[in-house]
Image: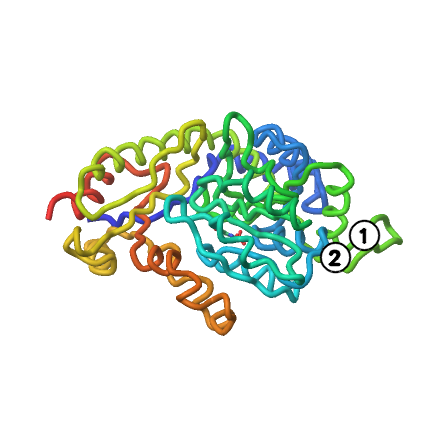
Amino acid sequence: MEQITVTSPLLPDREEFSRLVAEIWDSKWITNNGAFHQRLESELAAYLKVPYISLFTNGTLPLITALQALRVTGEVITTPYSFVATSHSLWWNGIRPVFVDIDPATCNLDPARIEAAITPRTTAIMPVHCYGQPCDTAAIQSIADKYGLKVIYDAAHAFGVEREGKSALCAGDMSTLSFHATKVYNTIEGGALVCHDEKTKQRIDYLKNFGFADEVTVVAPGINSKMDEVRAAYGLLNLRQVDSAIAARRHVARRYQDALRDVAGIRFLNDTPGVRHNYAYFPIFINADEFGETRDELYFRMREAGVLGRRYFYPLISDFSTYSALPSASRSNLPVAYSIADSVLCLPMHHALTDTDIDRVLSFITRR
Ligand SMILES: *Cc1c(COP(=O)(O)O)cnc(C)c1O
């Protein structure tokens, strides 16, 4: 039987893409803020309902650049339950990550634990909308306001996520996106940085182009993180089909939710009323005593049969050698995150899964 992969890239139509590539060849403008780059920025801003967005060449550089743009230093409060790029962006800026535990109901940074981790060196909070579940942005903002901290959301999972009709990307000072091939919306590799005003976007655009403000003026030690025309054109085509991809994901999520609701020892994240979810991932949390099998036993049993789940996020960022010696990385500081990392399994989730695929995935969990 064919393998069922955990993710599958959303690909534009090949002929349409070839026509756009031919246009780029004819124009001979292949990178540096070309026509497709400009069009994708304006179409993304409209689709995502955000005022300003800057395209990047991946989803890690906007994190690094946001910290530069906001001149964040010292210590930053962040979650250990994320992809390692979240903390790496701090490390690349010489900033010390301070890990705070997560809320088991959402897998997001627990606002009730943030204040205790603030020190005189703290300058910002970097939360993640984990699996596309929006953080408690109001609670986080009120702490940030009280202590004068910046807030940068790693929104790599939150493409298109809205609460009460408002984009989750509008929270905090800035939000970052990843358009990596594995994400809900992709430009092969790519990313973006969302901000609230024109001057900040201008600053970001300088920073992503070596700091050039004009031909002869460099205003900052910027980096090169520009997106090229070929990937911008690819991104324009994918934007036209991302709604139908999210609808297909919603169907998969509904089928998983319905089938797993009454399985002892399996917990999953329910939809939140008022939230437009993007179904970026479908994590289940396994209570081995009740389910009768550990997370790893289930993961390997599925894998041997060609059904690939992913232990995401496992290990925790705080468990990697770069960070494990930090005082905030200890197991006793992060009991919830450690226990979730040991029990989570993300089931296959993408737009191309068929009902037969879904049945096959579920059979490992419901029929034993
Ligand atoms: C994918 C991802 C990133 C990094 O994005 P890249 O485009 O791979 O550089 C950062 N943070 C989170 C939470 C991610 O899932």
Q: Secondary structure at mark 1?
A: strand
- The spot of residue 249 in percent (x, y) is 36, 35
Q: CA distance from mark 2 to mark 1?
A: 8 Å
For this rendering, which residue is in front, 365 or 149? Answer: 149
The quadrant in which residue 332 appears is bottom left
Q: Residue at x 37, y 37 (%)?
A: 351
Which residue is more in the foreground, 52 or 166?
166
State the mark number for residue 148. Answer: none
Q: Is 59 drawn above or below residue 355 in the view shown? A: below
What amino acid type should be assigned to the residue bearing mark 1?
Answer: Phe
Q: Answer whether labels 2 and 1 touch (C-beta < 8 Å).
A: yes
Q: Which mark is residue 212?
A: 1
> At which x and y percent is residue 130?
45, 47
**Of residues 40 and 30, which is closer to you in this image?**
40
Residue 177, percent from left and from top: 56, 45
Q: Is residue 313 visible?
A: yes
Circle 2: residue type: Gly
Residue 209: image x %, image y %? Answer: 74, 52
**Could you tell me which residue is drawn at 67 percent across and 53 percent down?**
65
Q: Residues within 10 Å of mark 2 (few under 14, many from 20)?
A: many
Q: Is residue 228 visible?
A: no
Disc 2: residue Cβ within 8 A of ligand 1's nearest atom: no
In this picture, residue 64 sits left or right of residue 216: left
Mark 1 or mark 2, which is nearer the start of the sequence? Answer: 1
Image: 259 above or below 83: above
- Which label number is shown at residue 222? 2
Q: Residues within 10 Å of mark 1 (few under 14, many from 20)?
A: some
Please report the residue visible at 24 percent of the width from the left and 34 percent of the height from the top: 355
Residue 254 quadrant: top left
Colour setting: rainbow
**What element does badge 2 sit on?**
loop
